[in-house]
Image: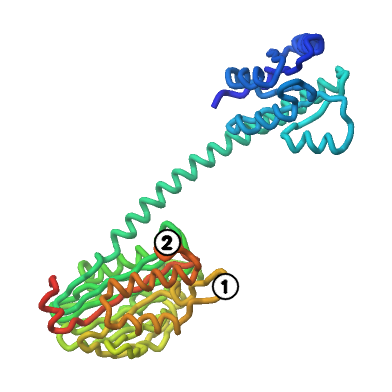
């Protein structure tokens, strides 16, 4: 983009006498003046020179002043050109047509010197404001680009913390769906071995959206990683820490870290015995986990509980459950059940349960793909759309494999 030169003026008039008189006057006032006798020549000069003030006669052959205004607005979108039309017209309709074509101001012929000078000063001031605004917009655009680059990096980091797809652990399988509402998400989840006998799992939904929620979700994931590799508060030796005790540990740590009562998260944490399928879980404000049998029957596992990181001295209850071969444990965030269509109707628990039941005999990959498609259709989007929803969406499906499925599975 060429630099703004508010001291240069282009005069367009097919009448040589009027054009020379006006040009001479402007040169006396210190302006650098270019002249054109018709519209095409004027457009060519505007392409060659960084002129931002244009004075044009309305009545001209071939291309009149209104047409020239329209062409200027069409061809020079990257720089603003202040246009003053010279005319003998006075009707309101004519002025309205001139403004609609892109004119900024009008001067009556014959031109009054004082009025012309005032209009030029007004045009220069507008151009200075325009240049200032353009400079600030460029700075904002650069800042936005940097923010977007940082968010892309943050999103990549957060996705690196998620488990791989199609997880296999000695007779167990897990897969997941994850749709952040923005670049980054407040949802996080995992399925991992605790020792040779037990498997652990969690699903977390941090309050709020965006960067602050994502940072807390990463902090929660870090606690779970340290809990089984460094501090080992998830288990010690052969003793598995009860899920309710783990939730209490997390609550103590996150309450101490934050004085903001809006900084909290809901979660489900639990453990499963690899051999028997017996498990225990603690639900802390998170939607109730669902157990889906192969015949489509659904059981609810969980009885509520307070969110984590909200208040001191809270306690939580545990729920026992057992997964038979072929059954699935589904952990989900409320971004699914509260997903709204354009009429602000929620997807709801009934639709989720119906979908899980209908896909009970299908592979988990098919279930996750079908859920994604159904949520898109609910939002009246193409089935394969990747557009974010109003809230983070996550679903972790943990399945106890049948013996024949175990034989064909690649186990870790």
Residue 309 visible in image: no
Scheme by which the image is coloured: rainbow
Front in this rendered view, residue 270 or 390: 390
In x, y percent, where is residue 298?
35, 89
Q: Secondary structure at mark 1?
A: loop
Tell me the mark number nearer the camera, choosing from 1 and 2.
2
In x, y percent, where is residue 53?
70, 23
Instruction: Say the numbered circle drawn on residue 344.
Output: 1
Residue that label 2 marks: 385
Residue 62, located in which quarter of the rendered image? top right
Quarter the C terminus occupies: bottom left
Quarter the N terminus occupies: top right
Tell me which residue sits at (34%, 59%) in the image.
158
Tell me which residue sits at (81%, 20%) in the image.
117
Q: Is residue 14 left or right of residue 45?
A: right
Front in this rendered view, residue 305 or 9: 9
Q: Secondary structure at mark 2?
A: loop
From what the image shows, is residue 266 above or below residue 142?
A: below
Tell me which residue sits at (88%, 18%) in the image.
110
Q: Is residue 124 left or right of residue 274?
A: right
Asked if the residue at tag 2 contacts the one at tag 1, i.e. Cβ–Cβ closer than 8 Å, the answer is: no
Q: Earlier in the sequence, mark 1 or mark 2?
A: 1
Label 2 Cα crowd, 10 Å radius (few <14 / some 14-19 / many 20+): few
From what the image shows, is residue 222 above or below residue 145?
A: below
Label 1 Cα crowd, 10 Å radius (few <14 / some 14-19 / many 20+): few
Residue 45, located in which quarter of the rendered image? top right
Q: Residue furthest front?
A: 62
Tell me which residue sits at (76%, 15%) in the image.
14
In x, y percent, where is residue 79?
61, 30
Front in this rendered view, residue 178 or 286: 178
Q: Is residue 98 left or right of residue 177?
A: right
């Amino acid at each position: 983009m060429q630099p703004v030169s508010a001291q240069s003026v282009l005069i367009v008039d097919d009448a040589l006498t009027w054009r020379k008189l006006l040009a001479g006057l402007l040169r006396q006032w210190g302006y650098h003046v270019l002249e054109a006798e018709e519209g095409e020549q004027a457009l060519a000069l505007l392409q060659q020179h960084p002129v931002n003030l244009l004075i044009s006669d309305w009545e001209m052959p071939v291309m009149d002043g209104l047409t020239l205004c329209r062409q200027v607005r069409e061809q020079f979108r990257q720089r603003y050109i202040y246009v003053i039309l010279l005319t003998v017209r006075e009707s309101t309709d004519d002025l309205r047509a001139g403004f609609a074509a892109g004119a900024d101001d009008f001067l009556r012929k014959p031109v009054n010197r004082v009025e012309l000078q005032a209009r030029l000063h007004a045009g220069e001031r507008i151009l200075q404001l325009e240049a200032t605004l353009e400079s600030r917009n460029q700075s904002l655009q650069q800042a936005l680009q940097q923010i977007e680059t940082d968010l892309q990096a943050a999103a990549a980091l957060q996705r690196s913390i998620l488990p791989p797809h199609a997880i296999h652990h000695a007779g167990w399988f897990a897969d997941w769906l994850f749709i952040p509402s923005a670049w980054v998400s407040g949802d996080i989840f995992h399925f991992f071995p605790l020792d040779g006998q037990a498997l652990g799992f969690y699903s977390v939904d941090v309050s709020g959206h965006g960067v602050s929620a994502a940072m807390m979700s990463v902090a929660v994931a870090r606690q779970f990683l340290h809990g089984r590799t460094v501090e080992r508060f998830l288990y010690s030796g052969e003793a598995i820490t009860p899920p309710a005790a783990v939730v209490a540990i997390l609550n103590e740590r996150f309450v101490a870290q934050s004085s903001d009562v809006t900084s909290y998260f809901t979660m489900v944490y639990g453990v499963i015995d690899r051999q028997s399928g017996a498990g225990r879980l603690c639900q802390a404000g998170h939607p109730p986990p669902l157990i889906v049998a192969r015949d489509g029957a659904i059981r609810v596992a969980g009885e509520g509980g307070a969110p984590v990181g909200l208040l001191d001295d809270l306690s939580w209850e545990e729920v026992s459950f057992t997964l038979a071969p072929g059954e699935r444990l589904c952990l989900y965030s409320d971004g699914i059940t509260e997903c709204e269509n354009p009429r602000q109707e929620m997807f709801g628990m009934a639709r989720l349960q119906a979908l899980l039941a209908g896909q009970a005999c299908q592979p988990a990959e098919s279930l996750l793909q079908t859920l994604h498609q159904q949520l898109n259709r609910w939002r009246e989007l193409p089935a394969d759309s990747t557009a974010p929803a109003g809230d983070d969406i996550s679903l972790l499906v943990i399945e106890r494999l049948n013996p024949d499925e175990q034989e064909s599975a690649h186990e870790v």
